[in-house]
Image (spheres, rainbow, N blue to C red):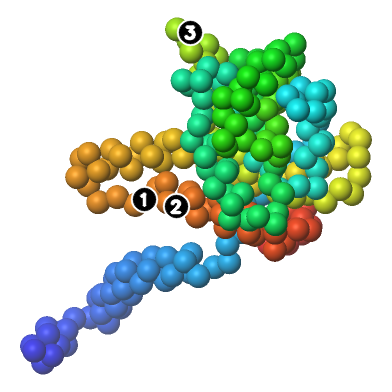
Amino acid sequence: MRLIAYLPLKNLSNTTKTVLVLVGVILISGLTIPQAYLRYIEKREFRPPFEKALTKNIQILDDLRGATSLSEYQGHIWLAYCTSSQEENANVLLHQKVAKLRAKFPDETIKTAIFVVDATIEQKDTLSAYRQSFSEFLTEDDYVIAANVRVLQKYLKNEFRFALLPYEKDGLWLYDHDLIILDRMPVKESGVGAVLAHLRGHLNFTKAIELDQQAIKENKPNAPFEEQLNKILVDSIQYFIDNPDEEDPLLSGEQ
């Protein structure tokens, strides 16, 4: 077979032979380079991305501590997400996720900023009632929060980069269901321009569950998206514990 394949090539010009060799190299590369890249992705060190530095502070009302500010979180690993005081529309899923996450890291303080989008700074009773409704999940490290509506909406969009600003439709409040992951920025300075934390990721478990269920319904092979996001969340917290003083590589000159 080798001889049969070789005979026609004897009569080809050197230019044609060169072209054929190049085509062969391209075809082989097209198969091997993606596989090599995937192997690299799987083996490379996990590091949550630096999305932005959180430098702006806002005043908030917390149901347990009263009037305070987001600087309360400085020096801690923390998470942030939106919810609603309407029990049927509350983001119970994320309360459960955070409760399970804390159980995996019993020696680490993980704080959460839970923004109740339909509450105002005059409605501490609303915040207290919300905590009571979900007392099985919430701890003193969960801050059930209200703030000035306009200030909060601007902050959620510009600082936390939520894609959907909270709004009311047909009596229900709609809001972004992302879980925001923030690292433990050491307290080095205070005042205007101080970095409270670095935004290190957005996870949407609600969407992941929808995609998983849709794949099952359509009898399609699927990657378990919820499982993947669970792993990213746990791995991120572990990374912050192992690297408490990490700086943004773009600011420090690292590649």
Q: Which mark is residue 85?
A: none
- State which quarter of the image contains the C terminus: bottom right
Q: Residue at x 45, y 7 (%)?
A: 170
- Horizontally, is 189 left or right of 145 in the view? right
Callouts 2 and 1 close, C-beta under 8 Å? yes
Q: Quadrant of the N terminus?
A: bottom left
Q: Residue furthest bottom?
A: 3
Going 36% across and 50% down the picture, which residue do you hit?
224
What is the residue that sits farthest to the top in this orientation? 170
Depth check, front residue: 17 or 49: 49
Q: Tag count in the figure? A: 3
Rendered position, 126 above or below 135: above
Mark 1 or mark 3: which comes first in sequence?
Answer: 3
Residue 107 is drawn in which quadrant?
bottom right
User: Residue at label 3?
Assistant: 171
Nearer to us in this view, 124 or 132: 132
Q: Which residue is mark 2?
A: 228
Alpha-carbon neighbours of circle 3 within 10 Å: few (<14), some, or many (≥20)? few
Q: Is residue 252 above or below residue 27?
A: above
Q: Residue at x 70, y 32 (%)?
A: 143
Question: Which of disc 2 and disc 3 is earlier in sequence?
Answer: 3
At mark 3, the secondary structure is loop
Q: CA distance from mark 2 to mark 1?
A: 6 Å
Mark 2 is on which residue type? Gln
- Label 1: which residue? 224
